[in-house]
Amino acid sequence: MNEVTFALVTGGTSGIGWECARILAGGKRNILLVSNQEEELIKCKAILEQEYTVQVITHFQDLSLPTSAEELYRFCLDNKLEIEVLVNNAGFFFFSEVVQVPVERASRMINLHVHTTALLCMLIGRHMKERGRGYVMNVASIASYKDFPGIAFYAATKKFIRGFSRAMHAEMKYYGVHVTALCPGATATNLYDPNVIDVKKGMRWGIMMTGNDVAKAGLRGMFKNKPVVIPGFLTKIMLIFAILTPHWLIYMVRVKWRHFFDQPSVK
Ligand SMILES: NC(=O)c1ccc[n+]([C@@H]2O[C@H](COP(=O)([O-])OP(=O)(O)OC[C@H]3O[C@@H](n4cnc5c(N)ncnc54)[C@H](OP(=O)(O)O)[C@@H]3O)[C@@H](O)[C@H]2O)c1
Protein backbone atom coordinates (compact mmCIF):
# COMPACT_ATOMS: atom_id res chain seq x y z
CA MET A 1 0.00 0.00 0.00
CA ASN A 2 1.80 3.13 -1.24
CA GLU A 3 -0.77 5.85 -0.48
CA VAL A 4 0.41 9.08 1.16
CA THR A 5 -0.91 9.35 4.70
CA PHE A 6 -0.60 11.97 7.42
CA ALA A 7 -0.38 12.22 11.19
CA LEU A 8 -2.71 14.98 12.38
CA VAL A 9 -1.62 16.63 15.64
CA THR A 10 -3.86 19.26 17.23
CA GLY A 11 -2.19 21.88 19.41
CA GLY A 12 0.96 20.67 17.69
CA THR A 13 3.06 23.82 17.98
CA SER A 14 4.01 23.56 21.65
CA GLY A 15 4.47 21.22 24.60
CA ILE A 16 3.37 17.60 24.30
CA GLY A 17 1.81 18.15 20.85
CA TRP A 18 5.03 19.53 19.39
CA GLU A 19 6.99 16.60 20.83
CA CYS A 20 4.46 14.18 19.30
CA ALA A 21 4.86 15.89 15.91
CA ARG A 22 8.65 15.61 16.11
CA ILE A 23 8.58 11.94 17.11
CA LEU A 24 6.07 11.08 14.37
CA ALA A 25 8.08 13.02 11.77
CA GLY A 26 11.18 11.17 12.99
CA GLY A 27 9.28 7.96 12.18
CA LYS A 28 8.91 9.22 8.59
CA ARG A 29 5.28 10.19 8.88
CA ASN A 30 3.96 13.22 7.04
CA ILE A 31 2.51 15.76 9.43
CA LEU A 32 -0.64 17.86 9.45
CA LEU A 33 -0.03 20.38 12.22
CA VAL A 34 -3.11 22.19 13.52
CA SER A 35 -2.95 25.02 16.02
CA ASN A 36 -4.29 28.44 16.93
CA GLN A 37 -0.70 29.81 17.01
CA GLU A 38 -0.17 31.21 13.51
CA GLU A 39 3.49 32.29 13.76
CA GLU A 40 4.53 29.11 15.58
CA LEU A 41 2.97 27.00 12.81
CA ILE A 42 5.37 28.56 10.29
CA LYS A 43 8.37 28.06 12.59
CA CYS A 44 7.44 24.46 13.43
CA LYS A 45 6.91 23.56 9.77
CA ALA A 46 10.37 24.93 8.92
CA ILE A 47 12.00 22.94 11.73
CA LEU A 48 10.24 19.69 10.85
CA GLU A 49 11.01 19.99 7.14
CA GLN A 50 14.63 20.79 7.87
CA GLU A 51 15.16 17.98 10.40
CA TYR A 52 13.11 15.25 8.72
CA THR A 53 12.40 14.55 5.07
CA VAL A 54 8.63 14.49 5.44
CA GLN A 55 5.77 16.54 4.05
CA VAL A 56 4.42 19.07 6.57
CA ILE A 57 1.08 20.81 6.11
CA THR A 58 -0.03 23.44 8.60
CA HIS A 59 -3.56 24.55 9.33
CA PHE A 60 -4.36 27.55 11.49
CA GLN A 61 -7.63 26.98 13.32
CA ASP A 62 -9.33 27.65 16.63
CA LEU A 63 -10.60 24.22 17.66
CA SER A 64 -12.82 25.44 20.50
CA LEU A 65 -15.87 26.28 18.38
CA PRO A 66 -18.88 23.99 17.91
CA THR A 67 -18.11 23.68 14.18
CA SER A 68 -14.33 23.16 14.55
CA ALA A 69 -14.20 19.38 14.06
CA GLU A 70 -16.36 19.40 10.94
CA GLU A 71 -14.34 22.28 9.45
CA LEU A 72 -11.07 20.47 10.07
CA TYR A 73 -12.49 17.25 8.63
CA ARG A 74 -13.64 19.21 5.55
CA PHE A 75 -10.10 20.66 5.21
CA CYS A 76 -8.71 17.08 5.17
CA LEU A 77 -11.27 15.95 2.57
CA ASP A 78 -10.78 19.01 0.32
CA ASN A 79 -6.99 18.52 0.38
CA LYS A 80 -7.25 14.72 0.03
CA LEU A 81 -5.31 14.15 3.24
CA GLU A 82 -5.69 10.59 4.45
CA ILE A 83 -5.16 10.60 8.22
CA GLU A 84 -3.42 7.50 9.55
CA VAL A 85 -2.58 8.92 12.99
CA LEU A 86 -4.82 11.31 14.92
CA VAL A 87 -3.45 13.00 18.04
CA ASN A 88 -6.18 14.98 19.81
CA ASN A 89 -3.85 16.98 22.01
CA ALA A 90 -5.01 20.64 22.01
CA GLY A 91 -6.17 21.71 25.43
CA PHE A 92 -5.99 24.44 28.02
CA PHE A 93 -6.19 24.76 31.78
CA PHE A 94 -7.37 27.21 34.40
CA PHE A 95 -8.11 27.31 38.12
CA SER A 96 -11.48 28.70 39.09
CA GLU A 97 -14.62 27.94 41.00
CA VAL A 98 -17.35 26.79 38.62
CA VAL A 99 -19.55 29.81 39.33
CA GLN A 100 -16.72 32.26 38.57
CA VAL A 101 -15.88 31.01 35.09
CA PRO A 102 -17.07 33.27 32.24
CA VAL A 103 -19.59 31.46 30.04
CA GLU A 104 -17.48 31.90 26.90
CA ARG A 105 -14.42 30.32 28.58
CA ALA A 106 -16.37 27.36 29.92
CA SER A 107 -17.94 26.77 26.49
CA ARG A 108 -14.54 26.91 24.79
CA MET A 109 -13.16 24.27 27.14
CA ILE A 110 -16.13 21.95 26.72
CA ASN A 111 -16.02 22.41 22.94
CA LEU A 112 -12.28 21.82 22.67
CA HIS A 113 -11.89 18.90 25.09
CA VAL A 114 -15.22 17.18 24.48
CA HIS A 115 -16.98 18.22 21.28
CA THR A 116 -14.00 18.62 18.94
CA THR A 117 -12.15 15.57 20.30
CA ALA A 118 -15.18 13.28 20.02
CA LEU A 119 -16.24 14.46 16.58
CA LEU A 120 -12.72 14.18 15.13
CA CYS A 121 -12.55 10.62 16.47
CA MET A 122 -15.90 9.88 14.87
CA LEU A 123 -15.31 11.50 11.47
CA ILE A 124 -11.69 10.43 10.97
CA GLY A 125 -12.24 7.10 12.76
CA ARG A 126 -14.75 6.10 10.05
CA HIS A 127 -12.00 6.28 7.41
CA MET A 128 -9.63 4.31 9.64
CA LYS A 129 -12.26 1.61 10.12
CA GLU A 130 -12.82 1.37 6.35
CA ARG A 131 -9.07 1.07 5.76
CA GLY A 132 -8.65 -1.44 8.60
CA ARG A 133 -5.78 0.60 9.98
CA GLY A 134 -5.24 3.73 12.03
CA TYR A 135 -4.01 5.15 15.32
CA VAL A 136 -5.73 7.61 17.65
CA MET A 137 -4.26 9.15 20.79
CA ASN A 138 -6.49 11.41 22.87
CA VAL A 139 -4.71 13.43 25.54
CA ALA A 140 -6.62 13.28 28.83
CA SER A 141 -4.93 13.80 32.23
CA ILE A 142 -4.52 12.10 35.62
CA ALA A 143 -6.86 14.88 36.78
CA SER A 144 -9.56 12.80 35.06
CA TYR A 145 -9.41 10.26 37.92
CA LYS A 146 -10.53 12.59 40.72
CA ASP A 147 -13.11 15.33 41.14
CA PHE A 148 -10.96 18.18 42.42
CA PRO A 149 -12.45 21.56 43.33
CA GLY A 150 -10.99 24.50 41.41
CA ILE A 151 -10.56 22.49 38.21
CA ALA A 152 -14.07 21.10 37.77
CA PHE A 153 -14.31 21.94 34.05
CA TYR A 154 -10.83 20.64 33.31
CA ALA A 155 -11.12 17.39 35.30
CA ALA A 156 -14.64 16.59 34.08
CA THR A 157 -13.84 17.22 30.41
CA LYS A 158 -10.68 15.12 30.70
CA LYS A 159 -12.76 12.37 32.34
CA PHE A 160 -14.93 12.40 29.23
CA ILE A 161 -11.84 11.98 27.01
CA ARG A 162 -10.57 9.04 29.06
CA GLY A 163 -13.92 7.22 29.17
CA PHE A 164 -14.72 7.92 25.52
CA SER A 165 -11.29 6.70 24.43
CA ARG A 166 -11.51 3.47 26.42
CA ALA A 167 -14.91 2.66 24.95
CA MET A 168 -13.73 3.50 21.43
CA HIS A 169 -10.60 1.39 22.00
CA ALA A 170 -12.82 -1.67 22.60
CA GLU A 171 -14.94 -0.86 19.53
CA MET A 172 -12.08 -0.23 17.11
CA LYS A 173 -9.64 -2.98 18.15
CA TYR A 174 -11.69 -5.45 16.08
CA TYR A 175 -11.18 -3.30 12.97
CA GLY A 176 -7.42 -2.95 13.38
CA VAL A 177 -7.60 0.63 14.67
CA HIS A 178 -5.74 1.56 17.87
CA VAL A 179 -7.28 4.09 20.30
CA THR A 180 -5.38 5.24 23.39
CA ALA A 181 -6.04 7.73 26.18
CA LEU A 182 -2.84 9.40 27.36
CA CYS A 183 -3.15 10.54 30.98
CA PRO A 184 -0.11 12.66 31.85
CA GLY A 185 0.63 14.03 35.30
CA ALA A 186 2.35 17.37 35.77
CA THR A 187 4.38 18.14 32.65
CA ALA A 188 6.70 21.10 32.06
CA THR A 189 4.90 22.96 29.26
CA ASN A 190 3.18 26.29 28.65
CA LEU A 191 -0.15 24.89 29.87
CA TYR A 192 0.01 26.60 33.25
CA ASP A 193 -0.25 30.24 34.20
CA PRO A 194 3.36 30.96 35.37
CA ASN A 195 1.93 33.17 38.16
CA VAL A 196 0.24 30.12 39.68
CA ILE A 197 2.51 27.16 38.81
CA ASP A 198 6.29 27.47 38.51
CA VAL A 199 7.26 24.92 35.86
CA LYS A 200 11.01 25.44 36.39
CA LYS A 201 10.68 24.58 40.09
CA GLY A 202 8.54 21.56 39.19
CA MET A 203 11.33 20.27 36.94
CA ARG A 204 14.02 21.03 39.53
CA TRP A 205 12.11 19.17 42.24
CA GLY A 206 11.59 16.22 39.88
CA ILE A 207 7.79 16.34 40.08
CA MET A 208 7.25 17.35 36.45
CA MET A 209 8.05 15.27 33.37
CA THR A 210 9.30 16.73 30.10
CA GLY A 211 6.88 17.00 27.19
CA ASN A 212 9.19 14.73 25.20
CA ASP A 213 9.07 11.90 27.76
CA VAL A 214 5.28 12.14 27.97
CA ALA A 215 4.88 12.16 24.17
CA LYS A 216 7.26 9.20 23.78
CA ALA A 217 5.38 7.12 26.37
CA GLY A 218 2.00 8.02 24.85
CA LEU A 219 2.91 7.21 21.26
CA ARG A 220 4.67 4.00 22.29
CA GLY A 221 1.48 2.95 24.08
CA MET A 222 -0.68 3.94 21.11
CA PHE A 223 1.37 1.86 18.66
CA LYS A 224 1.17 -1.09 21.10
CA ASN A 225 -2.62 -0.56 21.30
CA LYS A 226 -2.80 0.18 25.03
CA PRO A 227 -6.21 1.57 26.06
CA VAL A 228 -4.67 3.97 28.62
CA VAL A 229 -1.13 5.25 29.16
CA ILE A 230 -0.06 6.85 32.44
CA PRO A 231 3.48 8.04 31.78
CA GLY A 232 6.16 7.98 34.48
CA PHE A 233 6.60 6.14 37.80
CA LEU A 234 5.89 9.23 39.91
CA THR A 235 2.68 9.93 37.99
CA LYS A 236 1.46 6.42 38.80
CA ILE A 237 2.27 6.92 42.51
CA MET A 238 0.54 10.33 42.50
CA LEU A 239 -2.47 8.75 40.86
CA ILE A 240 -2.75 6.07 43.56
CA PHE A 241 -2.60 8.79 46.24
CA ALA A 242 -5.21 10.85 44.40
CA ILE A 243 -7.59 7.89 44.09
CA LEU A 244 -7.14 6.97 47.77
CA THR A 245 -7.63 10.54 49.03
CA PRO A 246 -11.09 10.76 50.60
CA HIS A 247 -13.44 13.55 49.57
CA TRP A 248 -13.69 14.92 53.13
CA LEU A 249 -9.93 15.59 53.03
CA ILE A 250 -10.20 17.29 49.64
CA TYR A 251 -12.97 19.47 51.11
CA MET A 252 -10.78 20.42 54.13
CA VAL A 253 -7.85 21.34 51.87
CA ARG A 254 -10.19 23.34 49.68
CA VAL A 255 -11.46 25.32 52.69
CA LYS A 256 -7.95 25.91 54.08
CA TRP A 257 -6.49 27.09 50.75
CA ARG A 258 -9.59 28.87 49.62
CA HIS A 259 -7.66 31.94 48.47
CA PHE A 260 -5.77 29.75 45.96
CA PHE A 261 -8.98 28.66 44.27
CA ASP A 262 -10.62 32.06 44.53
CA GLN A 263 -8.03 33.71 42.26
CA PRO A 264 -8.94 32.63 38.74
CA SER A 265 -5.77 32.16 36.68
CA VAL A 266 -5.46 34.51 33.74
CA LYS A 267 -3.90 32.16 31.16
N1 LIG B 1 1.18 20.08 31.07
C1 LIG B 1 0.58 19.24 31.89
O1 LIG B 1 0.91 19.16 33.09
C2 LIG B 1 -0.53 18.35 31.41
C3 LIG B 1 -1.00 17.34 32.26
C4 LIG B 1 -2.04 16.54 31.83
C5 LIG B 1 -2.60 16.72 30.57
N2 LIG B 1 -2.13 17.73 29.77
C6 LIG B 1 -2.79 17.91 28.47
O2 LIG B 1 -1.82 17.85 27.43
C7 LIG B 1 -2.31 18.55 26.29
C8 LIG B 1 -1.20 19.42 25.74
O3 LIG B 1 -0.92 20.43 26.68
P1 LIG B 1 0.57 20.94 26.99
O4 LIG B 1 0.85 20.60 28.40
O5 LIG B 1 1.49 20.47 25.94
O6 LIG B 1 0.35 22.52 26.97
P2 LIG B 1 0.63 23.60 25.81
O7 LIG B 1 2.09 23.68 25.55
O8 LIG B 1 -0.09 24.82 26.24
O9 LIG B 1 -0.06 22.94 24.53
C9 LIG B 1 -1.43 23.02 24.27
C10 LIG B 1 -1.60 23.36 22.83
O10 LIG B 1 -3.00 23.37 22.48
C11 LIG B 1 -3.26 24.58 21.80
N3 LIG B 1 -4.62 25.03 21.93
C12 LIG B 1 -5.25 25.49 23.02
N4 LIG B 1 -6.48 25.90 22.72
C13 LIG B 1 -6.63 25.72 21.39
C14 LIG B 1 -7.67 25.98 20.47
N5 LIG B 1 -8.82 26.55 20.88
N6 LIG B 1 -7.50 25.68 19.17
C15 LIG B 1 -6.34 25.15 18.73
N7 LIG B 1 -5.30 24.88 19.55
C16 LIG B 1 -5.44 25.16 20.87
C17 LIG B 1 -2.33 25.58 22.50
O11 LIG B 1 -2.24 26.80 21.81
P3 LIG B 1 -2.42 28.20 22.69
O12 LIG B 1 -1.34 28.19 23.69
O13 LIG B 1 -2.31 29.27 21.66
O14 LIG B 1 -3.79 28.16 23.30
C18 LIG B 1 -1.06 24.76 22.55
O15 LIG B 1 -0.40 24.76 21.30
C19 LIG B 1 -3.54 19.32 26.76
O16 LIG B 1 -4.71 18.66 26.33
C20 LIG B 1 -3.43 19.27 28.27
O17 LIG B 1 -4.69 19.37 28.91
C21 LIG B 1 -1.10 18.53 30.14
Image (spheres, helix red, strand yellow):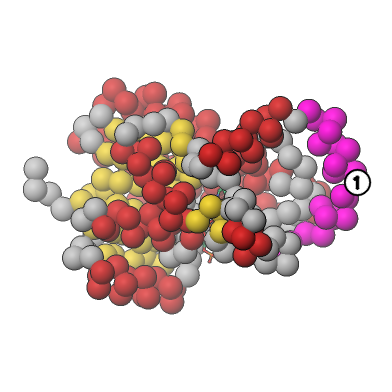
Tag 1 secondary structure: helix
| Residue 204 belongs to magenta span | no
Name the residue at 87% across, 50% down.
257
Relative to 148, residue 7 above or below: below
Name the spot of residue 26 as percent of width and height, x first.
26, 58
Can residue 122 be seen here? no
* Residue 173 x/y as whole percent: 32, 26
Indicate whether 34 appears above or below 133: below
Instruction: Say which quarter of the image contains residue 10.
Output: bottom left
Q: Give the class, few, some or many, for how many residues have Cα within 10 Å of label 1's Cα (few <14, many ≥20).
A: few
Location of residue 177 in the rendering, given as x and y in whole percent from the top left corner: 29, 33
Name which quarter of the figure residue 172 lies in. top left
Left or right for 253, reference 52: right
Q: Please state, as top left, top right, bottom left or bottom right, where the C terminus lies in the image.
A: bottom right
In this picture, which residue range is highlighted in magenta?
246-267
Please state if 18 lies on the left or on the right of 203 as rendered.
left
Q: Main secondary structure of the magenta part?
A: helix
Can you see residue 176? yes
**Residue most toward the left?**
2
Q: Give the residue drawn at x 21%, y 56%.
A: 28
Residue that protrudes farthest toward the front in the picture: 205
Q: Position of residue 206 (x, y in %)?
A: 60, 53
Mark count? 1
Tell me the kind of residue under disc 1. Lys
- The residue drawn where x is 50% and y is 38% is 230
Residue underneath mark 1? 256
Hey, which quadrant is residue 53 in on the image? Answer: bottom left
